[in-house]
Amino acid sequence: MAYAVASTGIHCRAGCPARVCLHENLRILDSRAAAEATGFRACKRCGGAKDGPPLALQGP
């Protein structure tokens, strides 16, 4: 699952520390690959395209 923001063209991992977007701009896609295929780029704060578990599941 990938969270994408239509107004910025960015997709994030779950638990990203970036500011929360407006609900009307939120897009939920099946995968990070699907987000990139539709033109969204990875977030620079959480590295939305990097492999690994969602940030919310990682330890400190």
Image (spheres, grey):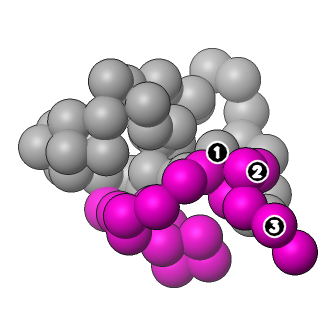
Quarter of the image for the N terminus: give it. top left
The label nearer to you, 2 versus 3, is 3
Q: Camera-side residue: 58 or 27?
A: 58
Q: Which residue is mark 3?
A: 59
Q: CA distance from mark 2 to mark 1?
A: 6 Å
Work out whether residue 17 can be spotted.
yes
Percent x, y for residue 22? 73, 33
What is the three-letter code of the residue carrying label 1? Ala
Residue 42 covered by magenta stretch? yes
Give the residue drawn at x 37%, y 25%.
29
Residue labelled with disc 1: 14
Residue density around tag 3, few if under 14, some if 14–19, many if 20 or more, within 10 Å: few
In this picture, is 49 found above or below 7? below
According to the picture, the residue beneath numbered tag 2 turns out to be 56
Residue 59 falls in image quadrant? bottom right
In the rendered image, which quarter is residue 41 located in? bottom left
At label 1, counting other C-alpha atoms closer than 10 Å, the crowd grade (few under 14, some 14-19, many 20 or more) is: some
Amino acid marked by disc 2:
Ala
Badge 3 vs badge 1, beta-carbon distance below 8 Å: no
Classified by dominant secondary structure, the portion drawn in magenta counts as loop
User: In the shown orientation, is residue 36 left or right of residue 53?
Assistant: left
Instruction: Indicate left or right for 45 with 29 as reference.
Output: right
Task: Give, as a single range, the part of the protein colored magenta.
Answer: 41-60
Residue at horizontal 33 percent and vertical 24 percent from the top? 30
Residues marked 2 and 3 touching at CB (< 8 Å):
no
Query: Is residue 16 at least partly visible in the picture?
Result: no
Earlier in the chain: of badge 2 and badge 1, it is 1
CB under 8 Å between callouts 2 and 1?
yes
Name the residue: 38% across, 69% down: 50
